[in-house]
């Protein structure tokens, strides 16, 4: 059995009187320490799948198993604990708390975790040692995203989920962020899942999951992932 | 649960960042709590103020009044009742003060240890010539401290003693009485019927044998707040105890008065009886005197008539005697005349004899003379004779002559004796005659005299009798007068007796008419000023329940909208936190702290302002109606915590409501921007005919109304609230300002009211009313009759 398994997962939204099927019988599995890139057009169900995996959304039917735990069966409290300790989340728009400085944003995460890393160390790791006292509004997009990544990895999660981390960034900065994520995955042996609509970055991953029409259409295993620096798009 | 530092930091930063919102919530809390606490505290503050005022002035708990006055025995009886601490007997009366411009009716109270007036200026009255007044009195009379006033206490008809020993009083100070905290001074029988002011006099100045009021202070009554349920129960309990001795004391007082009156009647009766006896005796005496007088008159009459007859008899016998004597005198006169004639004859005989004898005597005398001549011649011869013998012869011749002479002398003597004898005889005869004549004349004179005397006596007797008769007549008249007088006095006496008897009966009737004493056991609630004050505190209390509700509702709505907005703004942040693994509580904490802080800070400031400000504002309004020396404002912990609690529930509740809705959502949802509310077709669209004609923006508006129901509702409620507040304001103004014309134009359409004295007779009042009607300025006069009555709840069977 894989580290993460998605088995026949369905997700339906109700928008008023209309039912939208976001996920339709999706199946995939991910091994521990893998760097996975999820690609697909908008509305294909990538984010829904990621949210379900991160314990931020529920399934309509199916099974989601992470490290032997049935996530879809977790109670509210357990779900919170799961989010708190097992998951690190990086958002497209960073989602930093504007009232808190960079380091405080990291602390916001570490303060609720048991085995968290030292915020200062993590800040150093993401290369923002000198900017940690700055407020998000004082930081550039890339810096903010780095803070967000720092916040996610400071929790020392089992799973780092990134939803379009470079979507709001320029090419160069995006590359830096992806590099950071790749490095983290490699160094910390962390399972990292990156959603992107940019198929070009797929070669950096160990596994590529292609979404289409609410289902994982194609799962490719990249035997020779390349470093981000070498990828051009 | 451990509060996370970073979260707290976020919270405080949030406050700093959105201070306007924070302050708006804070202000709502401030207003809500301030109004609630302030308004709620106003009533207790007012009660507190009067409570401490009454406590410091030792104001009564229970007042006892009686229709027949109260005595020291009553005081004793009341003092023995359980819970009664002090019993004060005191006096009060209405009085009239006349000044140059007007007549003022005043309540005359006396300074006592109970219901002590508060001295505002000057001194308390220390002697019977001094008094203190209220401030308004000085204004109304234009007097000052140090001026004098003349007061005339009310007097009932049968009252004799003056209520005040000194009626000309010097004003020495200004006071405020705890008994009259409102403008209401009560009613009176004097003047206009309304008491205008009160004055306090020294207790020594009062001259009354009964107390008009008894005031009672209860033990431990200072422990309770006035008008509180505990206090009222306590007073009520004691009142019941007083009620228990009431009948006994009423009867005692009644009996006392009856006894007094009876004793007086008995005394009067005694007096009446002695007077009656005296009068009767006097009348009897007078009668006896009259009878005696009559008897005397009769006796006198008899005497007079007997005297008259006696006098007549006497006169007759006297007259007869006189006539007898006269007859005798007549006879004697005749006898005398005969004797006279006889004597005359004798006399003439004697005369003849005498003449004879005279002749003889003459002869003798001539003889003697011849001798004497011879003797002389011889003597001459003797002298011439020279011889003795011649001398002897001559001597012899002389001697012979002497002898012859002697002889002649002897003859002469005898003749003379004869003559003398005759003469004597005649003289004696004549004397005898004379004598007899004189005797007769004397007798005659005597008789005449007697006759005269008789006549005189007769006259005098007759006049005496006449005068006696006259006297008798006048006596009789006198008696008659006396009798008439007696009759009159008798009548007078009878009417007087009747009168006196009537009076006695009246007095007795009055005694029977003495109404049984009736005690009135009152407490503070019967004091007009106090009770209206307490009622006003109650109405403030009611307002203070209603009014703050509006503020709480507004506070809740305002915080609901601002918190909703805030939560909506921070939807992503909430989602992020949730994604990071924060639980609901942690996330909510920020908003709870946020609103709690605003709420508590606002509330604390609000209650401090409210407790100070609102009671004072309210008191400012009530101060026009009530006179209290000091208004006490205190911090009321109960209301402050209730107010704060309520506003906390409103604001934090509203916050919880919005935040709970939000945190319940899944983080995935939260992270997505909130789906805009889907538009819906509205009913209006079916009415094509209207819908067609609407502009696009109008269509949007119509749809939005149903799309954002909450917003729409809030707008409606907001406008509703504001409109109703404004309308309420105008409505209040309107209804208050229409009270006056309603009351004084539609209900009371009189301009002047004249109270007639009950002592006026029907004709007098009719005459007065007719005069009134005839006055040009008077349009109409309506006569009415007014009487005070008491309505009691019928006791349930």
Image: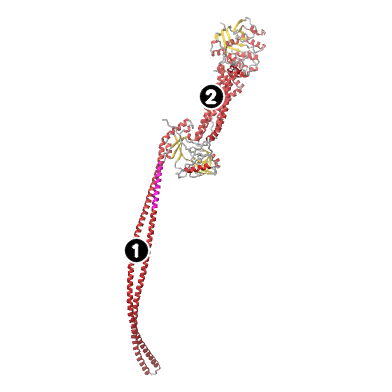
Residue at 32% x, 78% y: name it.
B339
Query: Residue B695: percent from the left, percent from the top?
Result: 63, 19
Image quadrant holding the C terminus of chain B, namely top left
Looking at the image, tell me whether mark 1 or mark 2 is earlier in sequence order.
1
Crowdedness of circle 1 by 10 Å Cα count: few (<14), some, many (20+)?
A: some
Residue B646: assigned label: 2
Query: Residue B764: percent from the left, percent from the top?
Result: 48, 43
The residue singled out by tag 1 in the image is B308
Based on the displayed image, in which of its 4 quarters is residue B470 positioned? bottom left
Q: CA distance from mark 1 to mark 2?
A: 135 Å
Q: Nearer the viewer, residue B178 or B427?
A: B427
Query: Residue B795: percent from the left, percent from the top?
Result: 42, 31
Q: Nearer the viewer, residue A171 or B242?
A: B242
- Work out whether residue B126 can be spotted: no
Chain name for mark 1: B
Q: Main secondary structure of the magenta part?
A: helix
SS class, disc 1: helix
SS class, disc 2: helix
Up the image or down, B695 lies above or below B193; here it is above
Residue range (magenta): B487-512
Q: How many marks?
A: 2
């Amino acid at each position: 059995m894989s580290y993460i398994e998605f088995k026949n997962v369905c997700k339906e939204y109700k928008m008023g009187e209309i039912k939208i099927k976001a996920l339709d019988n999706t199946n995939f599995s991910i091994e521990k320490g893998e760097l996975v890139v999820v690609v697909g057009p908008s509305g294909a169900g990538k984010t829904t799948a990621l949210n379900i995996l991160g314990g931020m959304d529920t399934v309509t039917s199916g099974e989601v198993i992470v490290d032997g735990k049935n996530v879809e069966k977790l109670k509210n409290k357990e779900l919170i604990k799961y989010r708190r300790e097992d998951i690190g989340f990086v958002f497209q728009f960073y989602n930093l708390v504007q009232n808190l400085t960079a380091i405080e944003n990291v602390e916001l995460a570490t303060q609720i975790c048991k085995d968290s890393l030292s915020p200062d160390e993590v800040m150093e790791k993401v290369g923002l040692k000198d900017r940690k006292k700055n407020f998000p509004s004082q930081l550039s997009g890339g810096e903010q995203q780095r803070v967000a990544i720092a916040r996610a990895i400071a929790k020392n999660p089992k799973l780092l989920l990134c939803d379009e981390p470079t979507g709001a960034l320029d090419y160069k900065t995006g590359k830096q962020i992806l590099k950071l994520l790749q490095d983290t995955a490699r160094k910390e042996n962390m399972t990292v899942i990156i959603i992107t609509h940019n198929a070009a970055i797929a070669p950096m991953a160990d596994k590529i999951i292609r979404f289409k029409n609410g289902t994982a259409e194609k799962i490719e295993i990249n035997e020779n992932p390349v470093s981000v620096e070498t990828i051009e798009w | 649960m451990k509060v996370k530092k970073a979260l707290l930091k976020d919270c405080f930063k949030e406050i700093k960042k959105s201070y306007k919102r924070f302050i708006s919530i804070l202000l709502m809390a401030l207003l809500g709590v301030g109004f609630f606490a302030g308004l709620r505290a106003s009533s207790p503050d007012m009660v507190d103020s009067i409570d401490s005022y009454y406590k410091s002035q030792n104001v009564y708990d229970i007042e006892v009044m009686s229709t027949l006055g109260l005595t020291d025995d009553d005081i004793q009886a009341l003092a023995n009742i359980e819970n009664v601490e002090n019993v004060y007997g005191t006096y009060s009366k209405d009085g009239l003060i006349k000044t140059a411009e007007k007549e003022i009716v005043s309540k005359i109270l006396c300074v006592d240890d109970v219901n002590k007036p508060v001295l505002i200026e000057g001194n308390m009255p220390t002697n019977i010539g001094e008094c203190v007044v209220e401030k308004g009195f000085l204004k109304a009379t234009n007097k000052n401290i140090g001026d004098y006033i003349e007061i005339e206490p009310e007097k009932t008809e049968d009252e004799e003693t003056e209520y005040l020993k000194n009626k000309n009083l010097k004003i020495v100070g200004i006071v405020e009485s705890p008994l009259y905290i409102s403008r209401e001074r009560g009613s009176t029988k004097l003047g206009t019927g309304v008491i205008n002011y009160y004055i306090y006099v020294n207790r020594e100045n009062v001259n009354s044998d009964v107390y008009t009021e008894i005031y009672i202070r209860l033990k431990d009554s200072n422990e309770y707040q006035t008008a509180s349920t505990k206090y009222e129960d306590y007073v009520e309990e004691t009142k019941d105890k007083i009620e228990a001795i009431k009948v006994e004391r009423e009867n005692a007082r009644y009996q006392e008065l009856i006894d007094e009156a009876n004793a007086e009647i008995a005394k009067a009766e005694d007096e009446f009886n002695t007077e009656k006896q005296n009068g009767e005796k006097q009348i009897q005496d007078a009668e006896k005197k009259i009878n005696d007088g009559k008897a005397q008159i009769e006796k006198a009459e008899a005497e007079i008539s007997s005297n008259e007859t006696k006098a007549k008899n006497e006169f007759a016998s006297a007259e007869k005697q006189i006539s007898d004597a006269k007859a005798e005198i007549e006879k004697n006169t005749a006898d005398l005349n005969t004797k006279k004639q006889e004597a005359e004859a004798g006399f003439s005989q004697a005369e003849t004899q005498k003449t004879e004898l005279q002749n003889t005597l003459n002869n003798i005398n001539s003889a003697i003379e011849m001798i004497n001549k011879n003797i002389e011649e011889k003597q001459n011869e003797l002298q011439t004779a020279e011889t003795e013998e011649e001398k002897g012869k001559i001597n012899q011749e002389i001697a012979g002559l002497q002898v012859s002479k002697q002889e002649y002398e002897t003859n002469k003597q005898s003749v003379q004796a004869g003559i003398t004898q005759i003469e004597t005889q005649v003289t004696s005869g004549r004397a005898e005659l004379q004598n007899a004549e004189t005797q007769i004349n004397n007798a005659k004179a005597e008789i005449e005299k007697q006759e005269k005397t008789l006549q005189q006596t007769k006259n005098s007797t007759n006049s005496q009798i006449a005068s006696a008769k006259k006297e008798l007549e006048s006596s009789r008249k006198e008696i008659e007068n006396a009798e008439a007088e007696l009759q009159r006095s008798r009548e007078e006496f009878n009417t007087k007796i009747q009168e006196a008897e009537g009076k006695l009966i009246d007095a007795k009737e009055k005694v029977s008419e003495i109404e049984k004493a009736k005690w009135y056991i009152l407490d503070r609630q019967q004091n007009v000023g106090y009770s209206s004050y307490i009622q006003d505190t109650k109405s403030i209390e009611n307002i203070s329940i209603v009014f703050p509700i509006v503020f709480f509702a507004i506070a809740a709505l305002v915080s609901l909208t601002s918190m909703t907005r805030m939560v909506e703004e921070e939807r992503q942040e909430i989602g992020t936190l949730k994604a990071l693994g924060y639980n609901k509580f942690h996330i909510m904490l920020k908003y709870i702290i946020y609103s709690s802080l605003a709420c508590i800070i606002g509330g604390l400031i609000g209650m401090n302002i409210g407790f100070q400000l609102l009671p004072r504002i309210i008191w400012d309004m009530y101060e026009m109606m009530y006179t209290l020396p000091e208004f006490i404002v205190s911090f009321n912990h109960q209301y402050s915590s209730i107010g704060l609690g309520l506003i906390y529930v409103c604001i934090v509740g509203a916050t919880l409501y919005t935040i709970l809705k939000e945190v319940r959502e899944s983080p995935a949802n939260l992270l997505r921007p909130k789906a805009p509310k889907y538009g819906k077709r509205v009913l209006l669209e079916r009415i094509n005919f209207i819908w067609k004609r609407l502009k696009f923006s109008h269509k949007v508006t119509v749809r939005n109304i149903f799309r954002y129901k909450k917003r729409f509702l809030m707008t409606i409620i907001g406008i509703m609230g504001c409109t109703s507040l404004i309308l309420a304001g105008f409505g209040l103004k309107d209804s208050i300002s229409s009270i006056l014309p309603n009351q004084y134009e539609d209900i009371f359409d009189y301009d002047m009211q004249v109270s007639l004295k009950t002592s006026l007779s029907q004709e007098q009042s009719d005459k007065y009313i007719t005069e009134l009607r005839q006055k040009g300025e008077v349009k109409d006069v309506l006569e009415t009759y007014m009487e005070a009555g008491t309505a009691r709840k019928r006791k349930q069977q």
